[in-house]
Amino acid sequence: MDPAPADQLPAYAEWFPRPVETWLAAGFGLLAVALALVAGDPVGLFLFGVAGLGLLLLAASDLLLRPRLAADPEEVRVRTLTGTRRLPWASLERVDVDQHERYGLASRALELEAAGHLIVLSRRSLGADPRDVAGDLARIRYTS
């Protein structure tokens, strides 16, 4: 497949967790809470309750922090629990993909460094491969 011509590249892009993962986390969270309510022993109540609440919090953060990363020709925006951080392209010192391999499994994360702060976004929080996101960020930054 041929790459799109420069005049057809999007000037704006955003990334967020895949909706299917969010709905699965919410569904399994509700299931775990329901199992906690019918668990006959205190340990089962505690374990299912903690797991269910954790999954429900994950699903809620996926919905509230949407989009996690957005970019346009002027700046990059990252949404976190403490608010939206706006990073003008001039202040962005480094955009890199960190890759580690352990037990045969590769793990990748997008790293954004600006003003002494390091922001790390995983594949799950971006909903896409961090290598693709880094390439899209470079295209948006340098073709606008």
Image (cartoon, rainbow, N blue to C red):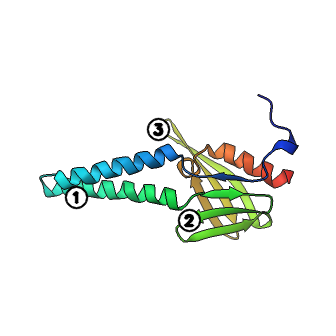
Q: On the image, numbered disc 1 is attached to which residue?
A: 46
The amino acid at mark 2 is: Thr
Assess whether mark 2 and mark 3 are in contact (beta carbons under 8 angstroms): no
Identity of the residue drawn at 54% across and 61% down: 65
Identity of the residue drawn at 79% across and 48% down: 139
What is the CA distance from the residue labelled 3 to the residue labelled 1?
Answer: 31 Å
Q: On the image, numbered disc 3 is attached to which residue?
A: 103
What is the CA distance from the residue labelled 1 to the residue labelled 2?
Answer: 29 Å
- Label 3 secondary element: loop
- Label 2 secondary element: strand
The amino acid at mark 1 is: Phe
- Label 1 secondary element: helix
The amino acid at mark 3 is: Tyr
- The residue sitting at the left extreme is 40
What is the CA distance from the residue labelled 3 to the residue labelled 2?
Answer: 30 Å
- Image check: 43 left or right of 126? left
- Image check: 34 left or right of 15? left
Q: Nearer the viewer, mark 3 or mark 1?
A: 1
- Sort mark 2 into few (<14), some (14-19) or many (20+) by Cα contacts within 10 Å: some
Residue 99 position, x and y percent, is 60, 45
Identity of the residue drawn at 72% across and 66% down: 87
- Above or below, comparing residue 115 to residue 120 in the picture: below
Q: Earlier in the sequence, mark 3 or mark 2?
A: 2
The circle on residue 80 is 2
- Image check: 19 left or right of 110? left
